[in-house]
Amino acid sequence: MTRPSQPHSGFEAWRRRQLKAVENGLDRALKRLNLTDQTTLGEAMRYALLEGGKRLRPLLALAAAEAVGGRARAALPLALAVEMVHAYSLIHDDLPAMDDDDLRRGQPTCHKLFGEGPAILAGDALLTLAFAVLAGGASQATGRFQEATIFLTRGAGAAGMVGGQALDLTLERRGSPAAAGEIRAMERLKTGALMAAALAGGASLAGGAPADLRRLWRLGLNLGLAFQIRDDLLNLSGDPAVTGKAVGSDSARGKATLPALLGSASAEKEMKSLNRKILAEVELYQARGRHLAGLIAALDERRS
């Protein structure tokens, strides 16, 4: 069975190139809004979107485009859009009514810096901007953009990320322990669905075949589960100086996580197994999937 390994030698150079394209694209999108009035909306949006972050989801979109035989830049509109949706979700997830977090990436959360009202509006604005950016990238291949938009709405909405967040709140407040299957289903929606949208949507813009899109969607759901298990493990025992988040907050709130239910060792074993299975599927794309494999290999041992 495939074992997670270090990214290949050219991966870091590829990652830096794509990050530059993503950062420049995000910055241009905000500048086009020309929010120069005296409200804090533009400032809050810039803070939430541009102040740090791994840009994992846009990189997944770009790598998926290459895996199906296209060029990374074909997926850039989707890559930018999915990162805006992700940034909006973090703003709202940190709010007192949700996870009530004070820190994000080692910095004050958006609502702590700007207030709850401006933070909510900044999240709303980023969500709507995401679809404007995606629509603005449409070319003559309008069918592909329609398909990518469907993937993004599916991954971000009630049948995806938002539905997973709602289930997370339900499990947290239910008062009885969650089953492992419930937690896995919640994590695949809450974290995995947006990764699935990045992968399938990026591949769609690059002309991926229906079988590729189905495979990448499924791969994204499992990748999200593995990613969330690592996050939950870091919340138990990570270094706050590295993770940029408070440690132990999940336990204090009684959140339903696989490490809490199964124990850290069993949860990590499940995460490793998921990553091996994901890499085995990525290997079907051979050399075209090397950057996608590099992303997954880098995630396997992350500490933040």
Image: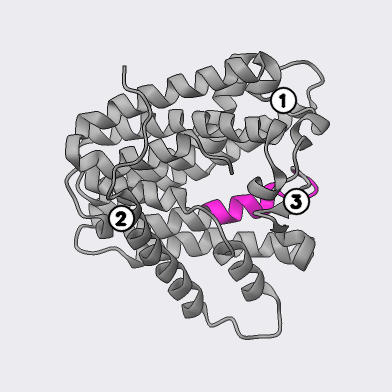
Q: Secondary structure at mark 2?
A: helix
Left/right of residue 38 with respect to residue 298 in the rendered view: right
Q: Position of residue 195 (x, y in %)?
A: 44, 41
Badge 3 is on which residue?
95
Is the residue marked by circle 3 packed among few (<14), some (14-19), or many (20+) residues within 10 Å? Answer: many
Quick one: which residue is furthest to the bottom in this view? Answer: 37
| Residue drawn where x is 22% and y is 35% of the image | 210
Tell me what residue is drawn at x 52 percent, y 18 percent: 269
Spatial CA distance of label 3 from label 1 is: 18 Å
**Decide: marks 2, 1 in contact (CB < 8 A)?**
no
Query: Which of disc 1 and disc 3 is earlier in sequence?
Result: 3
Image quadrant where one finds the C terminus: top right
The amino acid type found where label 1 is placed reads Leu
Residue at numbered disc 2: 14
| Residue picked out by circle 1 | 171
Q: Main secondary structure of the magenta part?
A: helix
Left-right relation of 282 to 4: left
Q: Nearer the viewer, residue 171 or 59?
A: 59
Q: Is residue 296 above or below residue 260?
A: below
The amino acid type found where label 2 is placed reads Trp
Visible residue check, residue 294: yes
Comparing labels 3 and 2, the label whose residue is closer to the camera: 2
Other-residue count near label 1 (Cα within 10 Å), few / some / many at <14 / 14–19 / ≥20: many
The stretch of residues the image draws in magenta is 86-98
Within 10 angstroms of label 2, few (less than 14), some, or many (20 or more) residues? some
Which color scheme does this rendered protein use? one colour
Q: Is residue 244 visible?
A: no
N-terminal-most mark, 2 or 1: 2
User: How far from the left and from the top, in percent, is residue 168?
Assistant: 67, 31
Q: Nearer the viewer, mark 2 or mark 1?
A: 2
Picture coordinates of residue 23, whole percent (x, y): 44, 66
In the image, 133 versus 284, the foreground residue is 284
